Amino acid sequence: MSELAVLAKAKVGDRVPLPEARRDGAEAVEKLLARRRSVRRYRPDPLSLADIAQLLWSAQGITADGGLRAAPSAGARYPLELYLACAEGLFRYLPAEHGLEKTWAEDVRPALCAAAFGQSFVGEAPVSLLFAAVYARTTRRYHERGVRYVHIDVGHAAENVHLQAEALGLASVPVGAFDDAAVAAAAHLPKEHEPLYVIPVGRQA
């Protein structure tokens, strides 16, 4: 039985703990920076739950007392919401408990692919990470300037994902070309969660 069976068996609203993230990678960041490239062809092999946990932690995991996270955020407002789309359904990452909450029981990757103007790799990669933003968390303090800060925040988090994928021997690609409303509908996002960025991740074909 696949170790991802725990995700498949979960019902909408269930919470699934993730394996603890490692903090002692063997490779220098300089090597990861030099190797990282955008990849658009993926093998269908599923990722391990440990790899999924590591990717999510690299983006928004808690790394210090007080709830500070792996990626910087203006004023520590943390406007980003991170979702995992895979064959087992759609899940929201819960940084405080390093776990997942199942938000949709079906595979939304085909709908995400359509919303991304048919970019096939969005549907073919075994997982796609979807970043959404609750702008009010940041604009409440920084007003109009806060919109820029949210966009900077997602850039920090996304780069962490790309480098972490490389460290795990995986490939990734940044996707910003999509219809916002269609992505929100495909992922059944709450109204205040506005999609910003999709990152397919898998093994290069």
Image (tube, rainbow, N blue to C red):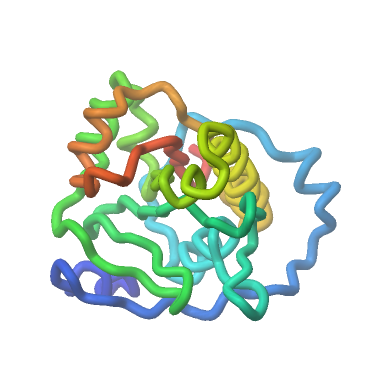
Q: Is residue 43 above or below residue 111?
A: below
Splitting the image into 4 quarters, where does residue 26 fall?
A: bottom right
Foreground residue, 95 or 123? 95
Does residue 169 appear anywhere in the picture?
no
Q: Is residue 152 left or right of residue 122?
A: right
Q: Is residue 127 above or below residue 19?
A: above
> Which percent across, then down, holds residue 57?
55, 65
Q: How far across and down, in percent of the image, does residue 200 sit? A: 44, 41
Residue 122 on image: x %, y %:
36, 34
Q: Residue at x 33, y 60 (%)?
A: 92
Left-right relation of 187 to 142: left
Please identify the quadrant where the N terminus is shown. bottom left
> Does residue 186 appear left or right of residue 173 in this picture?
left
Q: Residue at image x 65%, y 80%?
A: 65
| In the displayed structure image, the side of residue 134 where residue 186 appears, left or right | left
Which residue is nearer to you in this view: 90 or 126?
A: 90
Q: Position of residue 27 (x, y in %)?
A: 80, 60
Which residue is depicted at the point 43% across and 59% down?
Answer: 47
Name the foreground residue: 52 vs 13.
Answer: 13
| Residue 34 against residue 50 in the figure, above or below | above
Residue 68 visible, this angle: yes
